[in-house]
Image (tube, helix red, strand yellow):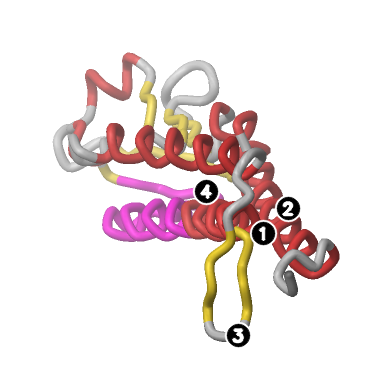
Amino acid sequence: MVYSWFQPWWIGDIATIRGTDDLVLHPWGIDAVGPVRMASDPALYEMPGFFEPFVWTYFGVAMLALLASLFVKMKFKVGPVRLPLATTLILLVGMSYLITVGLAYFIGDMRASGLDMNFIGRSDYTDPTSHRKVRMDSALQDGYWYALYAGVALFSLGIIRFLFLREWRK
């Protein structure tokens, strides 16, 4: 989970700007190279100001929950089943990370479609400030897939731990 957090999840390459990786999406926001920042309105690609502190807080809480799951022996009762808190923490972190990955794709697609662009693939776009035509190629990166797999792995680990350790019967 930690490795996927620090890897790029999506990259946009603008054909008229030299080099690659002109827009890089991380879980906490988008990094833009100098020419993109200078030639376009930041409102087109930046997230709101509260977003970055919110996702870093989420990441810290998720890491603390996984760390706590190693040491917590408490159980709580839900109906006739006594659930171990450690297993519940792992399940919640896995599920929340899957939701995070889904939301990243949804928000990226929603913002791209608002500009009449494709979130994945090739797009032709007319910049409203300079009225220049821009071609952009974009794709999901390995970090996105690692994050998806990490969420599935954590959720699966929680279910396996719940089913096979049989802590819920005691």
Which residue corresponds to mark 1?
Answer: 155
User: Cα distance, mark 3 to mark 1?
Assistant: 22 Å
Q: Residue at point 34% right, 46% down?
A: 125
Left or right: residue 21 versus residue 145 is: left
Residue 99, percent from left and from top: 49, 59
Tell me: residue 166, above or below residue 120.
below
Give the magenta part as a residue range.
102-125
What is the three-letter code of the residue carrying label 1? Phe
Q: Which residue is mark 4?
A: 122
**CB under 8 Å between discs 2 and 1:** yes
Residue wearing tag 2: 153
Counting residues from the N terminus, which is met first, the one under dot 2 or under dot 3? 3
Residue under circle 3?
Answer: 80
**Residue 118 coordinates in the image, percent (x, y):** 45, 55
Q: Nearer the viewer, residue 32 or 122?
A: 32
Taking the spot 31% from the left edge, 53% from the top edge, the residue there is: 111
Q: Amino acid at mark 2?
A: Ala
